[in-house]
Amino acid sequence: MKRGCRSCRVVGSAISPADVAIPLLEDISGKWKVLVFVLAYAKDEEEKQRLFMARSATLFVCQSCGSSHNKWAGKCEGCGEWNTIVEETPAERPPQGLGRVRGRVIEFAQMSGTSAVQPRRKTGIEEFDRVTGGGLVEGSAILIGGDPGIGKSTILLQAVARLSGEAKCAYISGEESVDQMRMRARRLGFAEAMVSLASATCVRDIISTLEKEKFDVAVIDSIQTMYIDNLDSAPGTVAQVRASAQELIRAAKRRGTCLLIVGHVTKDGQIAGPRVLEHMVDTVLYFEGDRGHTFRILRTVKNRFGPTDEIGVFEMGETGLQEVKNPSELFLSQRQHEVSGSAVFAGMEGTRPVLVEIQALVAPSSLGMPRRAVIGWDSARLAMVLAVLEARCDVQIGSNDVYLNVAGGLRITEPAADLAVAAALASSLSGVPVPSDMVIFGEIGLSGEIRNVGQLDTRLKETSKLGFKHAMIPAHPKTKDKKEGLRLTQIQHLKDMLSLFTEDTRP
Ligand code: TYD
Ligand code: MG
């Protein structure tokens, strides 16, 4: 605090505390304590702002979740990631307040008024159009996230190539050269499509180009490679990603261009960069799927122009992503009949019913703490189902390893899968298969009661369409014993389901 002594001399004169504090704030540690002290003495708002600016000259931002900290740390307090905090210089000044200038009075509109219907551009790829809510809306921004190599560039190139007949399309890549893009287009059978290709990363150049050329649809692949030249941080950092996206979206909205932005995901599956990216765009799509499997699922996470939770199912083949019109058939295609530890669940993905096989393996464990491995479902819900089976139904699983897998790489989030999971577990433990023409669904409560689930009729219709004869569902006084040609077994408690695995009580 030697500098402090120098400042002491000025404090004695009629100079304000800010003049003393600013040089101090710029190069001592523990700035916040000094700042809080001095802010209390600031004579007006403007002086407070100057003080604040001096302090906020540097900022430490987590590259994983985007939270900012006032000092560097090895571990981010926000998301728990290690070595993700990087020093950044904030681009924007802190808000200046409104000052004395008055704004104009806003005019309100009535709810009952009519508005023009948003025109949509359909790509003709039905699965893609479904997740976008029925086609691309003019001036909208769509973010597509997913693991590397999952097929983001492929689906977008296919989409713009299909649209190129009726709309002016551009594909701007910061990851591939024009030659690589041409090669991919040739492989997909779109060598002659009228799509403008460019390899660029400078946002200033891209915006000038978009403004001049007036494209209807533009793809930015990927936002992590784009940079704004008057920011100091490297491409891919939170500050760059946020600023680039903001500028691109603003420019696209001004021109009515539909912007499709590719975003990489971090290892825990979130779109890299701040979550604000998800707030800035109108639609967020996630590409899911295992690279070991050929099918891919495009899921709507947010959509300002349509329903969320819709999925589009594709299969990656020699000529790009092919649509899968009936996913249930695909997910059940490799099912083995009459094996224990397998149950078929009738789930809903958005507005569409999807039948999937749930596989469980309960095996004796050699570990002190048995393993619980889950793929495609929530591990906390598995723990709950296991606890209910043990506590309410006397099924002893505790000392066994438990493996649970949703076959085909689909991720299920519905609680309605509880009962099918419990059936697969009980079947594996007892070695008795679930009847192969039976579909199971229902939510399990903590006391072991089976709760009702939504869209019963849609689930049953799909079940019947795929040739199943029998369904185990939650009991409801209004549901009949037969529906859609299916025999319905209605149960009230988890114990009733276990009768499937004792020979003399099998339905
Ligand atoms: P890509 O779209 O480049 O992935 P992303 O942009 O999400 O990183 O997909 C690349 C993968 O898809 C790669 O592993 C090769 C495979 N692929 C095919 O199997 N068939 C095809 O016709 C194409 C174009 C790609
Ligand atoms: Mg790519």
Image (spheres, grey):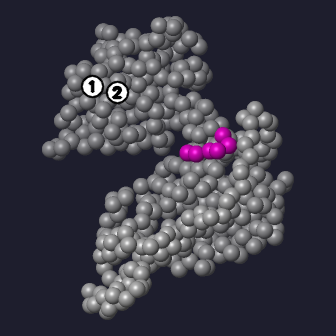
Whether residue 444 appears in this view of the structure is: yes
Residue at image point 82% right, 56% down: 167
From the viewer's perspective, is 202 left or right of 256?
left
Q: Residue furthest right?
A: 166
Q: Is residue 15 above or below residue 249?
A: below
Residue at image point 33% right, 60% down: 77
Q: Quadrant of the C terminus?
A: top left
Q: Is residue 376 above or below residue 210?
A: above
The amino acid sitting under disc 2 is Ala
Q: Position of residue 325 (x, y in %)?
A: 65, 37
Q: Which residue carries the number 1 mark?
A: 389
What is the magenta range? 301-306
Identify the image quadrant of residue 72: bottom left
Whether residue 171 appears in this view of the structure is: no
Residue at image point 43% right, 17% down: 474
Query: Where residue 422 is drawn, which disc sits there?
Result: 2
Q: Quadrant of the N terminus?
A: bottom left
How crowded is the residue under tag 2: few (<14 C-alpha within 10 Å), some, or many (20+)?
A: many
Whether the residues at callouts 2 and 1 have beta carbons within 8 Å, the answer is yes
Q: Is residue 254 magenta?
A: no
Residue at image point 69% right, 67% down: 172
